[in-house]
Image (spheres, helix red, strand yellow):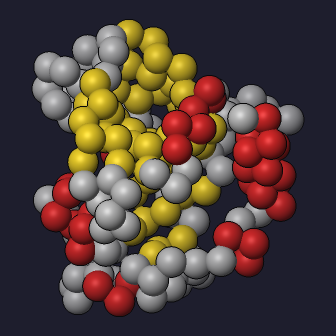
């Protein structure tokens, strides 16, 4: 089996990182909160175990940010150009990073596995056929591949 690896960076290049494994799952979130936070029609995040994101250069800074859940999130940004490279959400804690797919050197390698919160998507966004789409959030057991579920369970059991 071929080893997965993809690098990413902020706009100025001060923060560089590498994903050393395939993400667990890639979410394309169309909620209004993500739209406001990104200034775009959606956020595209690759969920992966934090220890499978290796910092190559620089040190992103955590910015505590309110979230729709009320529990907040940490958005890790380059201290120079302020680009968000990943987040930690309260529900997943520091065990998992939600890497901004657009910061990857080759973002085309990680298309969304699911579109979520489509009830609030921009009306001009056309969702592709063949990719699951749900009005709000989703049942992980239904949509995630078995290997990703096993990796998640293993991570939760070790910490």
Residue 107 appears in the figure: no
Considering depth in this image, is 126 or 32 the residue closer to the camera? 32
On the image, the x and y values in percent for residue 56 come to 45, 12
Q: Residue at x 28, y 24 (%)?
A: 61
Q: Tell me which residue sits at (54%, 71%) in the image.
A: 114
Q: Position of residue 31 (x, y in %)?
A: 31, 74
In percent of the image, x 37 and y 57: which residue is there? 71
Q: Quadrant of the C terminus?
A: top right
Q: Residue at x 14, y 26 (%)?
A: 81
- Front residue of 39 and 74: 74
**Nearer to me, 90 or 145:** 90
In the displayed orientation, state which residue is furthest to the top.
57
The quarter of the picture where residue 30 lies is bottom left
In which quadrant will I find the N terminus? top right
Q: Residue 35, located in which quarter of the rendered image?
A: bottom left
Q: Is residue 108 above or below residue 155?
A: below
Q: Looking at the image, which is closer to me, 84 or 123?
A: 84
Q: Position of residue 82 (x, y in %)?
A: 16, 31
* Residue 137 visible in the snapshot: yes
């Amino acid at each position: 089996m071929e080893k997965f690896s993809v690098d990413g960076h902020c706009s100025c290049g001060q923060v560089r990182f590498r994903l050393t494994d395939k993400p667990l799952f890639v979410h394309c979130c169309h909620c209004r909160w993500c739209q406001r936070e990104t200034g775009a029609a959606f956020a595209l995040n690759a969920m992966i175990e934090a220890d499978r994101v290796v910092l190559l250069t620089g040190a992103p800074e955590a910015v505590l940010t309110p979230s729709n859940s009320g529990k907040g999130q940490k958005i890790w940004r380059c201290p120079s150009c302020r680009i968000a490279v990943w987040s930690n959400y309260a529900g997943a804690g520091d065990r998992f990073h939600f890497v901004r797919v657009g910061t990857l050197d080759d973002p085309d390698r990680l298309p969304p596995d699911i579109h979520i919160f489509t009830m609030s998507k921009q009306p001009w966004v056309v969702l592709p056929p063949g990719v699951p789409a749900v009005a709000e959030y989703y049942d992980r057991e239904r949509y995630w591949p078995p290997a990703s579920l096993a990796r998640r369970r293993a991570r939760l059991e070790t910490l």
